[in-house]
Image (cartoon, grey):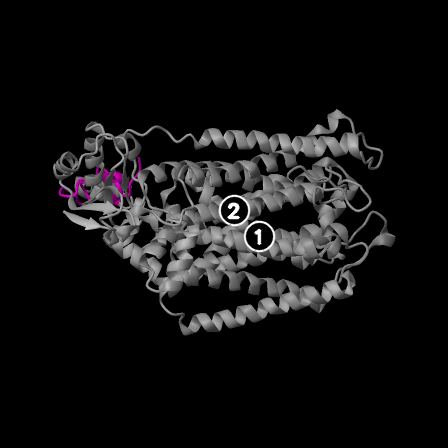
Amino acid sequence: MADAVMQSPEAAAERLTRPPLVRNDRSMAWITDHVASCTERSAPKWWWIAFTLSASLAGVSVMCIAYLISTGIGVWGLNHPVGWAWDITNFVFWIGIGHAGTLISAILFLTRQKWRTSINRAAEAMTLFAVVCAGIFPAVHVGRIWMVWFLAPVPNSNAIWQNFRSPLLWDVFAVSTYFTVSILFWYTGLVPDLATLRDRAQNKMRKFFYGIAALGWRGGNRQWKHFEMAYLILAGLSTPLVLSVHSVVSFDFATSVIPGWHTTIFPPYFVAGAIFGGFAMVLTIMLPARAIFSLHDLITDDHVDKMCKIILLTGSIVGYAYAMEFFIAWYGGNLYEQYAFINRATGPYWWAYWSMLFCNVVSPQLFWFRFFRRHVLWVFVVCMFVNAGMWFERFVIIVTSLHRDFLPSSWGMFYPTWVDIWTFVGTFGIFLTLFLLFIRWLPMICIFEVKAVLPEADPHYDHDAHSSIASGPTQGGSH
Amino acid sequence: MEKAGNPKAKLFGMAAEASSATALYQAAEKVRDAGYTRWDVYSPFPIHGMDQAMGLKKSWLSALVFCGGIAGLTIAAALQFYPSTIEYPIIVAGKPINFFTVPAFFPIMFELTILISAFTATFGMLALNGLPRWNHPIFNWDHFKKVSNDGFFIVIESTDPKFDEEKTQAVLESLGVNNLTLVYGD
């Protein structure tokens, strides 16, 4: 700091200047062209290879589900006492990943974090695809899937209504609302960019489909006025929604009387974990996409740096929650609760517990250091650890709590079958297939929002007097 | 002056292009002060403060969404109270079903409030904007395609009570805009 004081006023001003959100003074036309052309070029070879692999993997998942439905839930390794295992683990894992997308698009919007503009579109798409993967598991885990309409709020064939006081029914409403609102939010934000693709379309097919999808958007200020209000309201609605979804998911566990589940810390703990795991997944798919499409001027190293800081923060909250669970188990004085937690750390699933702790709490601590936040390879490695760790977290919570019932005669272990394993592995295929289709057909960066954070988008921008010092600390537009 | 569309069809308005967001903003202030009411500025992104520059009031979409939220809350309350207390109360493990169990209904009330509000926000926005629609006279001007890339346009519509080809042309020319064009319908 002493150095900074000694510097000349110009150098000090330079230090105070915010790094620009778009690097290399790119023009609006450059942004349009660079982002839109990703969808206009014919698909490169790597895309076809990746698509074939991921679509095949998705096919494996679909076949496993067909086998499950045609044969019965016994093809999974479920047993007594472990009646929920990989199915619900995978459900919570995937739904949690979705949360980062909504956090970026809604909460960072409300808090006026303008750096979100270049990553929100892809992150929201990721939300949708993750929720698609998540939705598979609760639907098929009921066994007789043709009865799944019993969850809908209509009386069933015996004229019996649902139990609206059950957290499982809350979950149906929470997840389906989350998916619907995420689609509405995503599509609303897409409309102006679809108009861009429509106006650039060279052939009849593209003109027709993007023309329909853009809904006749013209970009008049009388339209922007309502558009901006709608976007603000949707952000305002999505913010409590995203916090509620994982809270409701955690109620599935917390309202039961199973030691290890019956804790009040669950809602905030689950929400923090969801954002933590979601940001790791955002980086996992954005870093390769950024490299392939050379989007380094739009998704800058500062973006990656900021996301790493959020991972560090939420990872530490998760670490605090793990510690607090242990503390309350001891402090609460309940014998079963104490046993459940000691058993987690030292029982037959000790390896899962310590893997979780290493991946989720220890590995993100690297992000205290700028060196690791700025090196893409390190960021990627830590994110892979976090992805794995968050799956282990759900596995630990679900299986270790169930496998030791109150009576020792009801103790057991869970062993996954090949159907368990391939259904889960296949969901990555579904996720990647949808994402690959997304980057081929839709602009993966929100074109109009990125333009709006350029310095010349400010109506009071002085075109003649502009220089990096003159615009001072507000460069990058913040008012 | 340039003409776009079919000159025999109805005149939609007089259009011009501004060179930047700043120029468009300053042009909007002048057109507002000249007393025009049926006009609009077009830009690739929403321009901060343009509503004031045009003299527009706040969007009342929020009022619609509020009604949507109330509707969602009401639907959720009815959906849960009626079956759970009147139509088919289920007693689970001897737990009460009286009014004091109402907190158990809050999550679904919350979710449906959000759901209907979000539907109202999206579809209300489209309705207020007159979307979706198949076509619009302004699209007859080929140059207007730039609006979704880096073009800034201003259009004074022929239905404006103050619209007069010569006077309006003079107003637009005084703004320092270029590509003055008469845009007709099909």
> x, y (%) of residue A72?
77, 62
Sequence-first disc among 2 and 1? 1
| Quadrant assignment, res A173 | top right
> x, y (%) of residue A148?
72, 51
* Residue at x 78%, y 43% (from the top left corner): A336
* Residue ranking furthest to the front: B8
Badge 1 density bin: few <14, some 14–19, many ≥20, Cα 10 Å: many
- Which numbered marker is on residue B81? none
* Residue at x 46%, y 41% (from the top left corner): A106
Mark 2–mark 1 CB contact (< 8 Å): yes
- Is residue A361 in view? no
Using the image, determine if residue A312 lies above or below residue B100: below
Relative side of A220 to B104, left or right: left
Q: Which residues lie in the magenta part?
A: A455-479
> x, y (%) of residue A353?
65, 54
* Residue ranking furthest to the right: A409
Q: Nearer the viewer, residue A102 or A347?
A: A102
Q: Nearer the viewer, residue A347 or B104?
A: B104
Q: Secondary structure at mark 1?
A: helix
> x, y (%) of residue A444?
41, 56
Q: Secondary structure at mark 2?
A: helix
Relative side of A36 to A409, left or right: left
Any magenta on residue A465?
Answer: yes
* Residue ranking furthest to the top: B99
Q: Amino acid at mark 2?
A: Ser
Dot 1 corresponds to which residue? A131
- Is residue B132 in view? yes
| Quadrant assignment, res A9 | top left
Q: Quadrant of the N terminus of chain A?
A: top left
Dot 2 corresponds to which residue? A182
